[in-house]
Image (cartoon, rainbow, N blue to C red):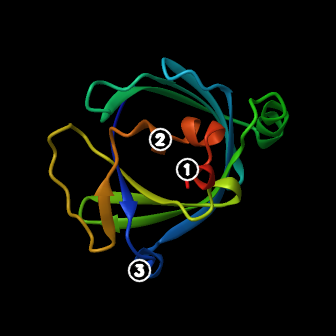
């Protein structure tokens, strides 16, 4: 139940041609407190309830528990969520033994593109594609829970 993940900004849209899968994600937060976020997500044609704990000092590791729920349940729970729904298209790009998940945001976060890679350990090595930009793993502004209340377009 430990998520080990690194986040990066994306410097170009070259990743799109490398994508093997893509789907829309709509998500909201029942609780966006960084100590324990509770997220409702519709990813493609499936619903999910996810609870995440606060990240460690580096921001790379944190507790994560997820359960699949019906899309009907997810749609109903989204109505109870805090203000600020996240809407994005996720692209999956395999590279070596890993898969990058690249999120292209819409709505109030339009213009933001973030790549994530899940690892088995914090020190695991991984290939970096040429479209990968600055690492933002420890910058909480790039967490979806933060973006739901402080949209990217308000940063400018």
Distance of mark 3 from mark 1, alpha carbons? 25 Å
Element marked by disc 3? helix
Element marked by disc 2? helix
Query: Could you tell me which residue is drawn at 72 percent across and 53 percent down?
Result: 45
Q: Mark 1 or mark 2, which has the lower sequence index? A: 2
Query: Could you tell me which residue is drawn at 47 percent across and 41 percent down?
Result: 141
User: How many other residues sit within 10 Å of disc 2, few (<14), some (14-19) or many (≥20)?
Assistant: some
Q: Mark 2 or mark 3, which has the lower sequence index? A: 3
In the image, 13 versus 16, the foreground residue is: 13
From the viewer's perspective, tell me whether residue 97 is left or right of residue 66.
Answer: left
Residue 135: % across, % down: 29, 52
To which residue does mark 1 refer?
155
Distance of mark 1 from mark 2, alpha carbons? 10 Å
Q: Is residue 15 above or below residue 148?
A: below
Residue 35: % across, % down: 48, 17
Q: Nearer the viewer, mark 3 or mark 1?
A: 1
To which residue does mark 3 refer?
14
Query: Could you tell me which residue is drawn at 58 percent across and 43 percent down?
Result: 147
Q: Is residue 148 above or below residue 113?
A: above
Residue 91: % across, % down: 51, 65
Q: Nearer the viewer, mark 1 or mark 2?
A: 1
To which residue does mark 2 refer?
141
Residue 69: % across, % down: 70, 34
Q: Is residue 88 above or below residue 56?
A: below
User: How many other residues sit within 10 Å of disc 3, few (<14), some (14-19) or many (≥20)?
Assistant: few
Q: Residue furthest front?
A: 156
Q: Quadrant of the C terminus?
A: bottom right
């Amino acid at each position: 139940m430990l998520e080990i993940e690194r986040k990066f900004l994306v410097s170009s849209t070259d990743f799109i041609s490398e994508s093997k899968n893509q789907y829309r994600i709509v998500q909201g937060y029942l609780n966006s407190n960084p100590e324990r976020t509770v997220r409702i997500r519709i990813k493609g044609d499936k619903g999910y309830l996810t609870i995440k704990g606060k990240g460690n000092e580096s921001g790379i590791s944190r507790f994560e528990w997820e359960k699949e729920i019906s899309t009907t349940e997810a749609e109903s729970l989204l109505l109870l969520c805090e203000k600020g729904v996240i809407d994005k298209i996720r692209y999956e790009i395999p590279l070596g033994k890993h898969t990058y998940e690249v999120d292209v945001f819409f709505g109030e976060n339009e213009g933001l593109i973030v790549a994530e890679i899940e690892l088995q350990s914090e020190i695991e090595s991984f290939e970096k594609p040429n479209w990968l930009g600055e690492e933002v793993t420890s910058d909480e502004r790039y967490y979806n829970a933060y973006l739901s209340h402080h949209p990217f377009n308000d940063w400018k």
